[in-house]
């Protein structure tokens, strides 16, 4: 029997497959899959309904991404609230610990400026391998963690801002 054909890049089937690659199958298998808005300020569209409270997004389209590349993500409700606030440049209101998965990694983002659109000499541009992310209601509890990646351990991205969160490298 011939192998199943891969979905065409950019098709809804491809976006679903790509989005689900961000998380362990136990999470992605029952997650809602949303597509990015067609334009900035627009609303995401649902590609697949889910049942477990997780929401996955495919790789960010070039029009929204600071760096091109693989960066699908799966987010629990708290992380989705955080991401929604960040995308609209609103202060996040996190009331519970939140987790996000980016098991394909991230092609690049500033480690210090939540809204940077590209590397600069002073914004600590970071390309991350597979990782999980954690948001907390009180970012002061993150003060003891380093503000930059080193040694493969957890670190705080955007430390000292309302968008501070833990980046935790993981092996795929």
Image (cartoon, helix red, strand yellow):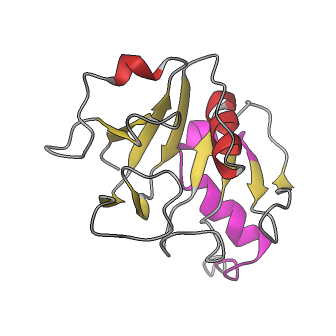
Residue 23 horizontal/vertical position (percent): 53, 45
Using the image, determine if residue 97 lies above or below residue 156. above
Residue 86 horizontal/vertical position (percent): 63, 45
Q: Residue at 83% across / 52% down in the picture?
A: 48
Q: Can see residue 88? A: yes
Q: Residue at 63% across / 57% down in the picture?
A: 19
Find the magenta span and give its range.
6-32
Q: Residue at 53% across / 52% down in the picture?
A: 22
Residue 68 horizontal/vertical position (percent): 50, 76
Q: Can see residue 29? A: no
Which quadrant holds residue 139? Answer: top left
Front-lying residue, 28 or 86: 86
Q: Is residue 126 left or right of residue 165?
A: left
Using the image, determine if residue 169 lies above or below residue 139. below
Q: Residue at 36% across / 51% down in the picture?
A: 111
Q: Quadrant of the N terminus?
A: bottom right
Using the image, determine if residue 171 lies above or below residue 161. below
Using the image, determine if residue 116 lies above or below residue 27. below
Residue 87 magenta: no
Residue 158 horizontal/vertical position (percent): 41, 43
Front-lying residue, 9 or 132: 132
């Amino acid at each position: 029997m011939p192998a199943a054909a891969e979905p065409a890049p950019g098709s809804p089937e491809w976006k679903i497959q790509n989005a689900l690659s961000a998380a362990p199958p136990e999470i992605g298998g029952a997650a809602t899959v949303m597509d990015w808005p067609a334009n900035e300020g627009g609303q995401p569209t649902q590609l697949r309904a889910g049942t477990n409270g997780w929401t996955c997004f495919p790789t960010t389209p070039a029009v929204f991404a600071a760096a091109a590349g693989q960066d699908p993500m799966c987010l629990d409700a708290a992380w989705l609230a955080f991401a929604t606030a960040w995308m609209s440049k609103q202060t996040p209101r996190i009331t519970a610990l939140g987790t996000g998965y980016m098991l394909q990694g991230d092609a690049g983002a500033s480690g210090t400026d939540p809204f940077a659109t590209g590397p600069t000499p002073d914004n600590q541009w970071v390309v991350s391998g597979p990782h999980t992310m954690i948001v907390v209601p009180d970012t002061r509890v993150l003060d003891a963690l380093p503000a930059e990646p080193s040694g493969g351990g957890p670190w705080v991205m955007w430390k000292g801002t309302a968008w501070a969160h833990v980046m935790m490298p993981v092996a795929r």
